Image (cartoon, grey):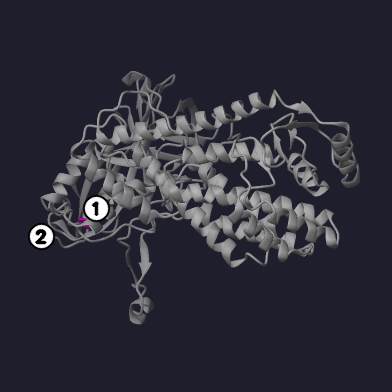
Amino acid sequence: MTNIWEFLLQTAEVSITAAIILIVKRLFADKLSPRWQYAVWILLACKILLPARLMGRYLSVTLAAGIEAIKMTAESTLSSAYSQQWIPIGQNTSVLPFVNKAPESVTDWLFALYVMGVLISLLYYGLSYVRLRRILRRSKRAEAVLLKKVEETCARYALSGCEVVTAEGIPSAFVCGFFRPLLVVPEGADIDEKILLHELLHRTYADALQNAFWCILRALHWCNPFLQYVFHRIGNDMESLCDQRVLEELEGEERRAYGKILLSMTDEKYARAPGTTSISNGGKNIKRRIEAIARFKKYPRGMALVSVCALIVLAAPIFAGSEASGYETDYPDLTDYRSKVMMAEARMNGCTTLAGAIDTWVKGKVFNLPVYLAAVTPYENQGKLQRQVEKGRNFSFDVSQGLHGAPFSNYAVYNLRKENERCYTALAVLVGEPGYEGQTDDEGEMLPVLTIPLTLEKEHGWTVTESGKIGKYKSPSGIGIYWGFEELPGAMTSEGKGKTGIIRIKEQTIRIVDNQIQNQGDVFADMMGDGFSFDPRAKRSAEFSEEKMFIWGEYRDCRSETERQGVKVIGMMAAVLEHMSDKISEDPIKKEYLRQEVSGSSNDGTAYDFRFVTQPWDGTFDGLNFILWDSPDSELANFEGFEARIYQDGELLDTLRIKRGAKL
């Protein structure tokens, strides 16, 4: 944690977890054993030690968004060193607070005060333990009678022994220490065997070490009174569990006698230092423990399985949490608190995939949805977006103008390219409906097309920024978003040089997110195959459902005109090579076909194109136009290069191997 807002989110989520556990414990107080009643606090410990935002999910998305909205408003007038207005809370993965610079604002000082409180609490617990150990240095070794009683108790109940000392001024026996614990007994007191059994069981199960662990967690939430009460309950449940273990060792009247011993301790003080345990833990707590003793029974073995199942069922909602189910589709009014929470939730719950980020950005632009845009806008541009929303900007205006006023129809992602681990570039290609205003009769039915260069970067999620000039095109309606045979910005070019000339191969990829939804209740449309429409909802975690790659090549013979004389047929074959190895052992084209003009491709990624050449020939051959793959799962989706073979009059003339992206 690095600021007060992250602490508020953390302590709020922990408090909700504690409240859920208390409610469940209340409902099952007389049904499940003290072992379960104490073991369930493991869930709280895990929640405290894990960040509030776990795998992009929160226990309460609404609560997290509310805190983020308050932070955005408060930090807008401050210059804080620990927090920034537009960086969402929940990004830090540490639950331990730390500061690395001087505080500058009110919220900074509040966080510094909290950190100081944590340190003081830890110091207090540590000094309390050290002080107690120093006092115990003056204690005396137990007399032979007491030592014998301890040894007999250990032998009777199969427990390991420990060092026993006596001290003045202590109300009851207790265990102190982590690794070599001492059993401390009031000097001159006649200690009942049952009290010794209780403390020896504390030692056996390392309860003193557990007590120290809970003290550390208590220090992390020292300013939350509700959690302080919860930690008090945890200590009581630890003692109740030890009572349960004692009762399981005792029989008949001994159990009743043990309850009477507890009753006699209702007015006694008890040690609060970390690293200690005591049978006496205050009047109110002992009353609760006696009530538990009154219901004591040896729970059947089957209840252990029930308890484990209950823990699993309870853990599921606590740790799985929830994520934003979707973004609001209303244009936000930022004078309204609900709208601020809408924007905050979108900023906190960014897009987890590249496809999801582009899908959210496109729909935000097309349908004028600032909340969508807030989810994919970089930190540094969030303020600009906020000001545009306050002015009521129409974000769909540029798109509609770019499509010549035609209604939006669909979109595709062209030439997605990885720049580094945290940055990609792509081209969003938006297509309008045919018959748009300004189309002339001799153009036929053309689709308006808008191309927008994008840069995607990883922050809290994937963000999207326009990174170049917007292009306007027209495309035949039969091709639509599969506009693959015209080179658009971002196409990859690979070049190689062989014995006879130079080959240049260009690739253009097209990726599509499935946005088709079935219209409800339109039976006639379903029968006509027209029962689907475009889904305007953003898909934060979308994957590309369809991918295609268009490849075309160009060969230029660099030989002299004299060397090229006599050429009648020129051909080129390119094989997609998974590891730039000899994947194709035999030419797939039979020699008798080389005398004809043929072209085609095979399933292994091989494509070929052969044509007659008329003289004089300028040495240029354009061919190798084919679609390579149409599935994200295709083995050909991650190939490394090409192999081109140049034929002249049916004989192999030259072979070139080209790595993708290679330049001359």
Pointer 2 residue: 437
Above or below residue 359? Residue 272 is above
Q: Position of residue 360 (x, y in %)?
A: 31, 51
Q: Position of residue 57 (x, y in %)?
A: 45, 50
Asked if residue 368 lies in the magenta stretch, the reply is yes
Q: Judging from the image, what secondary structure is the residue with disc 1 in?
A: helix
Compare marks 1 and 2 and give the one earlier in the sequence.
1
Q: Can residue 336 be seen by looking at this rendering?
A: yes
Q: Which mark's residue is nearer the viewer, 1 or 2?
A: 1
Circles 1 and 2, Cβ within 8 Å, touching? The answer is no
Pointer 1 residue: 340
- Give the numbered dot on residue 42: none
Depth check, front residue: 74 or 182: 182
The residues tagged by marks 1 and 2 sit, at their Cα atoms, a distance apart of 39 Å
Type of amino acid under label 1 = Lys
The residues colored magenta run 367-371
Q: Position of residue 331 (x, y in %)?
A: 19, 58
